[in-house]
Image (spheres, rainbow, N blue to C red):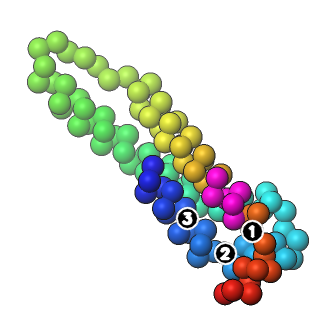
Amino acid sequence: MFRAVCTVRLYGGTKKKEISIRLVLGAPFESIYKLLTLDFLKLIVIAIFIAIPIGWYMMNRWLEDFAYKVDIGWEIFLSAGMIAMAVAVATISYQSIGAALIKPLKSLRTE
């Protein structure tokens, strides 16, 4: 969670000038939100698709050693992926709203 916040904050800080120029030119909030959100959501979806098979394989190997056999259902991985997406969207939304509400002229003057 902390790493996601730091990554989004760093990304928003590097794009501050671009966001300010877009705001001065009259870009709507939705456009700025999409700009900041879509890149991170793509990365998170890719990470989930990589992590699910690896996690399933490792959990099955670990659970084979127990006397009572337990199968892992797809619901566990689906819920973990949904929780990761929800945390990411909440973090990105918080940072995007902050970035979209900055005063563009003050930001452009300082850079």
Query: Who's the residue at 74% across and 87% down the image?
Result: 109
Name the quadrant of the C terminus.
bottom right
Which mark's residue is nearer the viewer, 3 or 1? 1
Q: In this view of the protein, which residue sits in the foreground, 22 or 77?
A: 22
Residue at mark 3: 9
Q: Which badge, 3 or 2, comes first in the chain's sequence?
A: 3
Query: How would you rate the neighbour count of disc 1 (Cα within 10 Å): few for under 14, some for 14-19, many for 20 or more?
Result: some
User: Which segment did they paint magenta?
Assistant: 94-99
- Residue 11, percent from left and from top: 56, 69
- Answer yes or no: do the residues labelled 3 and 2 have beta carbons within 8 Å? no
Q: Is residue 11 above or below residue 63?
A: below
Between the C-alphas of marks 3 and 1, the distance is 14 Å
Quick one: SS at disc 3?
A: helix
Query: Who's the residue at 66% across and 75% down the image?
Result: 16
Residue at mark 1: 102
The answer to whether residue 34 of the structure is visible from this angle is no
Q: Which badge, 3 or 1, comes first in the chain's sequence?
A: 3
Query: Who's the residue at 50% across and 36% down the image?
Result: 83
Quick one: SS at disc 2?
A: helix
Identify the image quadrant of residue 76: top left
Q: Is residue 8 above or below residue 61?
A: below
- Three-letter residue code for mark 3: Arg
Quick one: SS at disc 1?
A: loop
Q: Is residue 20 above or below residue 7?
A: below
Which mark's residue is nearer the viewer, 2 or 1? 1
Q: Which mark is residue 16?
A: 2
- Three-letter residue code for mark 1: Ile
The answer to whether residue 47 of the structure is visible from this angle is yes
